[in-house]
Image (tube, helix red, strand yellow):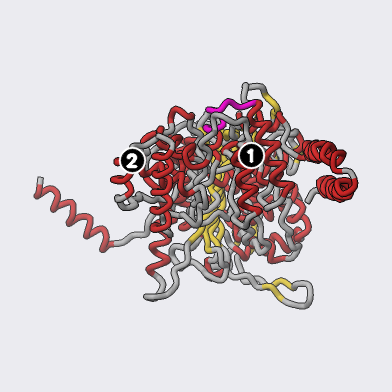
Amino acid sequence: MNPAIARAQAWTVDQLRRARELARRHPVRAALLLPALVLAYLLALLPFTPSISDLRKAKSEVPTVVLSADGVVLAEFRRLHREWVPLNKVARPVIDALISTEDHRFFEHHGIDLRRTGSALLNTVRGQRQGGSTITQQLARNLYPDQIGRAVSINRKAKEAITALKIETIYSKDEILETYLNTVPFLYNAFGIEMAARTYFDKSADRLDVLESATLIGMLKGTAYYNPVLNPERARDRRNTVLAQMVKYGKLDAKRAQALAARPLRLDFERQEEPVGLAPHVAQQVRKWLIAWADRADYDIYADGLVVRTTIDSRLQKAANAAVTRQIRSLQAQADGSRRRGADKPALQAGFLAIDPRNQRVLAWVGSSDFAQEQFDHVNQARRQPGSTFKPFVYGAAFMEGMSPQDTFLDQAVSIPERGGGVWSPRDSTPPSNRAMTLRDGLAYSRNSITAQVMQKIGPARVVDLAYALGVRESKLEPVPSLALGTSPVTLREMVTAYGSIANEGHYLGEPQLVQRVDDRKGHTLLLVTRPKPVDAMPRPQALQLVNAMRGVVDEGTGSAIRTRYGIQADVAGKTGTTQENTDGWFILMHPQLVAGAWVGFDDSRITMGQGWGEGARSALPMVGDFFVQALRTRAADPRVEFAIPRPRPKAREPAPHDPVQELVNDLLGRLMKMIQ
């Protein structure tokens, strides 16, 4: 209880004690004093009831709308899951049933029905508890449950009565009915008559018939007790009681009511789920940010009609959704098929993020493979080992130390001492060639032996510093040699941010930006999010060197499917990543105007993906490839734009060795074709 209210109640009790003593000694004086005490008590409670401005705000409550950059609605932030309908869109039997059952003198009183209140008090004294609240008093409880409460106490009834009187001063009777019917709860996350009509009868509120109206209004006496889904017999009896009340007050013919009462309870029940929307994880992020901003700026995100314009491109978001869904469906089938019959088949998860590296604006964000089943955000919340997608930071640090992409190391077995006395011996998927290999090829073909030697030469500290400068700023990176292969868990958001800095010629522009501006309901801009000043995370020449080296990944290396399978000929660079035992699959692709990255894996990191489909080039790359095809086709990224360093010439293909058998086969095929012609 509020301390001030408690003090007011204690003062009133003390005054009543004095009044009883006064009544014993001076009855006449006591009779004159009692109204004054009651008035003083009500005045003491007045500041602790909703103000007139609060009541006006409730009457005009408008949810926040979240829009994409191109004007598509992504989400609405409502206080409750309801759809407001005007009174003229509610079937007349609903209103007749409500007034007949809950407050038949509704149009005669001013918020408090004194006769009904007196009768209720008398029956309560006799031991027969009876409700005496009017529709207006019930509305006060529904609108302000925290301020009024539901405890059986004098305080609660007094605050309820005061609020009801206030409501009657600013609302018309029709407005009170409309507000009541749109705010009353009906179980199963259905608030208001429209959602109740859809939930229990699969129709809109203006199409409810007499029986359906009586059923829903009957629930108001106790939604759980008279739940027509779980307690159909009670609900039917209560429905018939409502029909009788309608007859009693002239809203229904007696013979018709008798015929209707004999009918069974017929429902068409379906839970009304809140729409997921085009970008549900974006909505989660925006809501979290907006709550903090609105609290500082004194706005109510559920009532003040704010309009939040995000950076999301709806076309790219749809493309990302489709790419993730399509690939996860394919991978899930492979994962399920590889498990023995009857074994648990955990759901494969994914995260996908696309940004514009020129300004760090988020263009598409998919936090899980299916938001309805998994709300955990694998872009922003999940920390997983990035595997070889971390290697560009090693090579970037090497270039900053004066090394060149054409410098060579021997592709050989490596053993590197670790702190604590151990030895780190990284392995590759194929045996070492024992030949010299350039840094560019070491990155393109993701050779662990080459990367480990580069890390040994420049030291882990420089790699940690560069990764932090580029955007990996929240996850802790262990400065150990094995960090070269991405052993420290990070988020996909951090990795895409860092690649965005590389694509932006080494300039870090801060965290990915989701919100462009916030407007009020009249279109006035309340907040404009400006572009942050760039910070030099990496010298431009070395950043471009790194981009050029990463071109090799898609031109001839582990990410070559971008060229061969997806036919993307635009100037792109990227990196695949796969962690031990195929636990995580990664791929991030860069273009001067677009950076997109994907992660695939199971939430339980003890569960691994299969050989042949779990590697980053096979699990994550197809999502990014699909997405980039759509982005380039729609000119969301211009395929003619290139990085500010000349693209290397394609490597000359070595002539195929002489094969006499193949020549004989080709000759026979040629002869056969001539005969057919």
Residue bearing the label numbered 2: 254
Q: Nearer the viewer, residue 8 or 460?
A: 8
Residue bearing the label numbered 1: 140
Range of magenta residues: 170-178
Q: Is residue 174 visible?
A: yes
Q: Nearer the viewer, residue 599 or 367?
A: 367
**Residue ID at (39%, 37%):** 204
Q: Is residue 172 magenta?
A: yes
Amino acid type, residue under disc 2 in the picture? Ala
Which image quarter: residue 237?
bottom left
Crowding around mark 1 (Cα neighbors within 10 Å: few <14, some 14 to 19, many 20+) is many
Q: Is residue 569 visible?
A: no
The mark found on residue 359 in the picture is none
Horizontally, residue 202 falls left or right of residue 551, namely left
**Residue ID at (65%, 61%):** 486
Q: Nearer the viewer, mark 1 or mark 2?
A: 2
Q: Nearer the viewer, residue 268 or 439?
A: 268
**Residue ID at (53%, 47%):** 366
Residue 135, x across and y down, in percent: 56, 38
Crowding around mark 2 (Cα neighbors within 10 Å: few <14, some 14 to 19, many 20+) is some
Residue 458, x across and y down, in percent: 75, 58
Residue 389, x across and y down, in percent: 60, 55
Tell me: residue 297, above or below residue 322. above
Task: Measure the alpha-carbon separation of dots 1 and 2.
Answer: 34 Å
Image quadrant holding the C terminus, namely top left
Residue 352, x across and y down, in percent: 54, 49
**Residue ID at (65%, 73%):** 425
Q: How many marks?
A: 2
Tell me: residue 355, above or below residue 519. below
Which image quarter: residue 206?
top left
